[in-house]
Image (cartoon, rainbow, N blue to C red):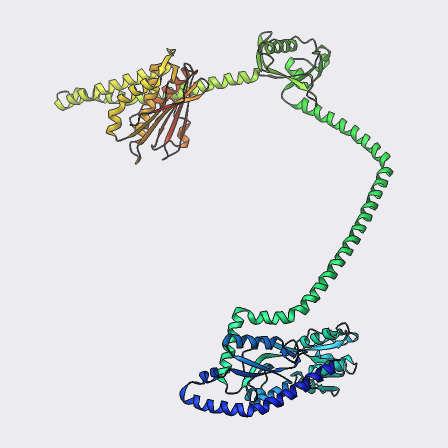
Amino acid sequence: MLHSFRHFHENNSLKEVGKIEQKNIGIFGVLFVLYIVGIFFISVPTAVAVKKTYYIAGDRNLPPFSYTNEDGTLSGISIDIMKKIASDNGLTFKYIPMSISEAETALKNGTIDAIAGITYSTENDEWFDFSDSYFTMSDSLIIPKEKVGTIRSIADVRNQHVVLEERTPVLNMLLNMRNPNLTITTNQYDGLETLLNGQADVFVGNKWTAAFYLKGSQQEKKIVILEEVIEPADYTIAVKQGEEALLLMVNNTLNTLKAKGEVNSIIHRWLMPQSEAQITQLKHFIFLLSLVLMAGALGIFFIYKWNQRLKKEVNIQTHKLVNLNMNLQEQRQVIADNNAFKEQVLNNIDTGIVTYGLNFKITSWNAKALDVLGLSANHIDNLQDSTLLNQLFHQYRVGNEQQEGSIIPYIREFNEGTQQKLISYRVVQMYDSQEKQTGYLLSMNDETEKKKLEHKLNSQEKMHALGQLVAGVAHEIRNPLTSIKTFIDLLPRKYDQPKFRESIIDHLPAEVNRLNKIVTNLLDYSRPRPPKKQRYNTVDELTSLLSFLQITIEKKQIILEQFVEKNLVFYIDPQQIRQVLLNLILNAIDAVEETEEKKITIKIKKEHGNTGKITITDTGIGIRKEDINRIFEPFYTNKEKGIGLGLSVSYKLVKENNGDIQVYSQPNQGTIFIVFLPLFETEGMKNEFTDFNN
């Protein structure tokens, strides 16, 4: 069938070539005259452009690159590219089917203008001009299916019967291998037919052409095409040497088509249908295989899971009695361990624990409870009747009823002979896992020794503070006394000197006043004076206080910001708290005096409940960490002219007014003093702020 198909195309092409050669005698004569005239008037590219019809030869036996259809016309990749070149340049190409040898002879003789699809070779380079490559052509090994495994590469064909086309580039390589068993054919058809007829072991040829023929004859299952690439070469368009204008036009159009991707599109359109069909079949096969494998896997998985489940059930039933017995033993051991753990914890904590049932009967206790109650292990039977324990629990029951069932801690003193015993205790209700009350838990601690230790520490602290106070008083009084003594010593010798008398008049009163101020401040600090509490309106009192300091603030160019909540009334001693605020503001003024940013902010607002908060913030030099814990000590100061009683007096006055004072500071980042004081009333107060900055 392949032979008859080839013979039909060869006869028709030879007849057509004969007619073309007869017609071309007159045509080429006219063209020659036009060419000579064009040399004198126009350039060579223009002469080519005038020629409207070009004769293009194509290999009739090289599908899918070029081959003759049943109607005798050429088709294929090369033909479609030539048609695109003609269309883009407005030219007419006439396509003539030939064998590749006939086409080379015709191009040499000038009976055709170009060959559409030819492998580049150095032998033809002296006769033809080749365009840029648009495909890489190569040969492959095509073998019968029974030869798979015997022939894998070109090296395995040495002792095999090889058939190949006479013009293939691999011919010289096989001849160099000294392989005498070669059969040479004139085209791909004959070589493939020889292989199919069993007259050869290997066909060396174009794999795309072989795949095309095998598919057409439905014999692709008998043949295997190996993917080894042999002798790759450029596949181009050939024109007669010297046809530079035509070659330039072909190359320009090819480059444009490549840039647009149209060359690849044409090649894929011819080559991909075969691959796509194979891929579709392969996908269908893989899909069916996947379904089968999945069904098999599911079946195996189901069987496996079922077997595992049966095995698990068998194991469970087999070891059920053993496990139950082991669980019982483990539970007994866990219960025993838990009881031992709880007993150790309860007997080693520093709190006495006694538990009661709902009927107020004692259910458990620990060793510390016996120690707090003064009972020994030999008198456990008397625990339920312990007078001290009954008093503690009775006081809780009475106090809890008064507090409407709330849980509150208690501290009670008991007399044991000539000594007092201080016990802190608390009673809480106990519940089970369903939040149902099961009884009561009494916890108690003996605070007697703790109280004695606190009293001792307070005494030591007072003695330490008294020592610091005496040292400070001695230091502060010694300075003015030294000055006075110096003047007294000089008085007999320099009394007659006017300047000396003037110096006495200037300095002695100042030193006496300083002594008086120290004594006065010391009396204010040490002399207890109960505060005279009354309503204190923050807006009025702060305005009055700041007006007193306004001249100093303006003179030192200090920015003062004030934010005071409206209708805020404190319940304090106004004179004492005025002295506190005055001391804190004066300290803030001294702190910002030497800083670049001089700013003091005063905020007064309600904190929570019946407590108000006064915050004084400055951008001053701050307080060192080691000094911040001592600033409230008497006579402790870092100021050159300070006495060191201002903050200690302020702290004492705030405490006497049931308040508190806190300080936060870092060096060079300013200081914040916060004073907490009780409010007179809080109902109906509105959280509004008055800004006095303007």
Q: Position of residue 608 (x, y in %)?
A: 45, 21
Asked whether residue 599 appears in the rendered view, the answer is: yes
Q: Residue 344 location, x and y as percent?
A: 70, 25
Q: Nearer the viewer, residue 240 or 509?
A: 240
Eyeballing the image, is 357 above or below 115? above
Residue 2 found in image quarter: bottom right
Quarter placement of the N terminus: bottom right
Depth check: give the residue in front, 219 or 8. Answer: 8
**Residue 165 location (% of width, % of height):** 69, 84
Is 111 located above or below residue 352 in the figure? below
Whether residue 201 sits left or right of residue 468 in the image: it is right
Callout count: 0
Q: Quadrant of residue 236?
A: bottom right
Percent x, y of residue 517: 28, 18
Residue 252, above or below 392? below
Horizontal side, residue 497 vs residue 489: left or right: left
User: Which residue does the image show at 59% across and 79% down from the upper left?
Assistant: 235
Q: Observer-nearest residue: 498 or 628? A: 628
Q: Is residue 349 left or right of residue 493?
A: right
Q: Quadrant of the C terminus?
A: top left
Q: Which residue in the rendered view is the most extreme toward the top?
A: 417
Residue 558 found in image quarter = top left
**Is residue 645 something one can see in this rendering?**
no
